[in-house]
Image: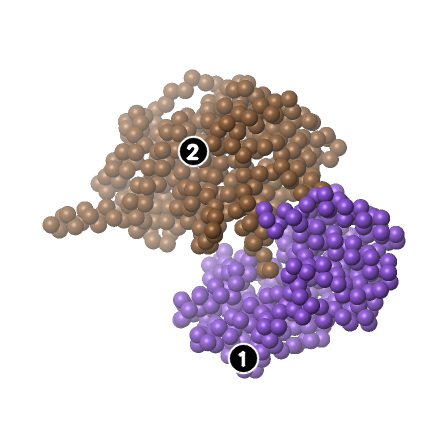
Amino acid sequence: MKYIDEYRDRKLAKELSEQISIQATRPMSFMEVCGGHTMAIHKFGLPSLLPAQVKLLSGPGCPVCVTSQQFVDKAVEYSRMDDVIVCSYGDLLRVPGSDSSLLQQKANGADVRIVYSVVEALAVAEANRSKKIIFLGIGFETTTPMSAAGILKAEEQQLKNFFLLSSHKVMPPAMAALIDEGVAIDGYVAPGHVSTVTGTSIYTAIASNFGKAVVISGFEPVDILQSILMLVRQVNANKPKVEIQYTRVVQPQGNMKAREMVNNVFEPCDDWWRGLGVLPLSGLRLKDKYKSFDAEINIPVSVKPSSEPKGCICGEILRGQKIPPDCKLFGTACNPVSPIGACMVSGEGACAAYYLYGNE
Amino acid sequence: MLHIIYMEMNKSTILLGHGSGGKLSHELIASVFLKHFNNEPLMRSTDSALLHIDCNDIVFTTDGYVVDPVFFPGGNIGKLAVCGTVNDIAVTGAQPLYLSASFIIEEGFAFDRLEEIVVSMAAEAKKAGVLIVTGDTKVVNKGKCDKIFITTSGVGVLDKKFKHIAGAGECRPGDKIIVNGSLGNHGMAVMSSREQLHYHTPVESDCGSLYSLIRAVTEEVPVSFMRDATRGGLATVLVELCGMTKLGISLDEEHIPIDDSVRGICEVFGFDPLYVANEGKVVMVVPAAYSTKAVQIMQSMAEGKDAAVIGEITGTEKPRVILNTVVGGKRIMDMLAGEQLPRIC
C-alpha cells in the first residue's frame, strides 16, 4: 500500500538497525512522548531490532493516560444527567473514574456517543437542540485545534447547547518537568503530529538549556528507527539540537493557522497530570469570551479530588525511571480489562502496549 | 375496501400479532418462512422436526446474531446467521445437515426487509447443502430489541477420521498455518456501514459458507486443526490454539493477506486487523508436506483465492504466538482485552 509499505521496508529497517548497533558505542536511553510512537514501537517489535545498549522509555504522551480521574468523574456525572449527551473519542470510554466509567454508564443507559471528531459532536448538538451536548476535549497540540475549530463553529452556528469539557494539555511543560526531575535520558523521540502544529521552537530550550537531543519523528517503523539513529549521532557528536526526521509532514514553523485558532480560543492554566501531578501552565481552558461554551462553568458538577492508586508505579514509568514489568500490579491486578494505573487505561499507554505487544 | 387497506398495512410492517401464534403468525410462517425454506421436514409443521441421521458422531452448535446494521455491504443478518452456524459445524470437520432458525423481531420492522433476510438465508442454506427444518418467531414491543435478532442452531455428522480436528490433538511442530484469504473485511464493512463512513473503495464483508472449501481440502489433505476466525480475529484463534496444544506459533506478518482497503481503514482508526472479525475465514493447520497442496486447493476456489501459508507451529519451549513483524521485529501476540476502540489521534 502506497505511503505505508515504503516506511515498513524490511531491508531499510535492517540497515538502520545495523547502523544503530554500530554507532551506539555506549549505553543510551531515549524517551518517546507520544502514545502513537509507543504503540508503533511495540506493534512492530522495534525493541527486538535495537542493540542492548539502546533503551527506549515511554513518557507521558498518551492523552488518555495523563487525563485526571477527576475529569473522568466529571464526565461520568454529566452522563448521569437526563438532558445531557456526552460525546467522546473512543478510547476515553474505558477509563475508570472513582465509581464508574463512561462505558459502564453507556451500559446503564446513559447517552454516551463515540465521535471521531468535534464536527460529529456539533451535528449531534444541531440534531438535539433540547439536550445539552458535552464534548470531552482531551489531547495535546494535535487535537486542540479541532476543539478550537469546534468552538468557533458552534459560535457561528449559534449552538447554545454545545459545551466543551476541556482537559487539553500542552507538551513542553511535561518534557521539561521530566528533565527537571532528573530523568536519565539522552534525548527525546519528539511527537510528530504535535510538532506539525507547534513547529520546532517548543523544543529549542530542551536542546539548548537541558542538553538533550531532540528528533521529531514520524510514526512508521522506518521513521522511528531513522530517528533513533539521528539521536545516536547527536549524542556521539555531543551537539544536542532539534532535528526533523518527519520532514514529509512537519515544517519548522508549524501550522500557523491552527496555532492562531488555539490562541484565540484557549488560554494556558495549571493542570494536573496523572503520574506527574500539577504542572504550571500545562493545561488549556477556554478564554472568557468563549465561557458560554465551557461545560464546567455552565453545568457545574462537584467531584472528589484525584489521587494516585495505591501500589501503582505509573508515575515512575511516565518519568522513565521504571518499566511496566517492574510493577507488582502489572498483568495481575492491573490489566486492560480492569486497569488500575494511568498507563494501562488507554491502548496507547506504556503498560497497555507492553501487555498487548510484549516484546520477545 | 377497508379490508384491503388492513391487509396492505399488515403486509408493510411486522406487528405484535405476527408473533401471537394466531392467524397473523400462520400467515407470516406460510408466506415467508415455509415459502422460502421449503423442505420436507419443515413442511410437516410438527412441533419438532423429525429427522433421521445414520451416524454415531454428531456435532451440535448454536449462535445468536444481533448485528447492527442488519444489512451491510456483502450480506445481512440472515446470511450471517446461516453461514456462521454452518461454518462452526464445518470447521470441526463435520458435514452440516440441519439448522433451526429463531427470530426475535421488533414490531414495526418492514415486512419486505424480513423477506429479503429470509430469502438470503434460504440461498445460503442451499449453497451449503443444509435444510432449515425448524424455527420460531417472536415479535417484541418497539425498543425491546434492535430490529431483528436471529438465533440459529445446527446439527452435522462427523466422520471418525476428522474427530481430532476440533481438539487440535494432532498438531505437531513444523505444521504450517494457512488462512483462506484477506482478514478483517467483515469487521470493517460492518463498522463502516454502522458509522456511515464512505470510502472510494468500499469494503465488503467476507460473510460466506466455508463448507465447500473445507470439504475440498479435507478430501485430500490430513488437516490437524481448523477454526473459523470470527470475533477476536486471527490473533484470538492462534492464542487459543497455543493454549490447547501447549505448542508455540511463529507467524509471519508479511504473508498475512489483508486487503489494502481494510489496511487503510485500520490505519486511520488505529485498529489492528489481526483482531478484527471475519465471517468467511478458516485458520487451518496442516503437515508441512501438504501445505502447498492445501493452498492450491483453496486458491482454485473463489472463497480461497487469496489463501496463504502465514506461519508454523514451533516447539514446546515457549507456548505463545510470536509475530515476525513486517520490518523484521518480533513481538508476542496475545488476546485482546476488551473491544477495539478508535483512538484519539
- Mark 1 Cα-neighbour bin, 10 Å: few <14, some 14–19, many ≥20: some
- The purple chain is A
Read off the residue under disc 2. B153
Q: Chain of mark 2?
A: B
The answer as to whether the residues below labels 1 and 2 share one chain is no
**Quadrant including the C terminus of chain A:** top right
Residue type for callout 1: Lys
Instruction: Where is residue A270? Give x, y as percent.
Output: 68, 75
Read off the residue under disc 1. A291
- The brown chain is B
Instruction: State the SS at label 2.
Output: strand
- Mark 2 Cα-neighbour bin, 10 Å: few <14, some 14–19, many ≥20: many
Quadrant in the picture for residue A242: bottom right
At a point 33% along the width and 51% down the height, the residue shown is B141
Q: Is residue A141 above or below residue B291?
A: below
Q: Nearer the viewer, mark 1 or mark 2?
A: 1
Q: Nearer the viewer, residue A43 or A124?
A: A43
For the view shown, which residue lies furthest in the right direction?
Answer: A26
Alpha-carbon span between mark 1 and mark 2: 57 Å
Instruction: State the SS at label 1.
Output: helix
Quadrant in the picture for residue A269: bottom right
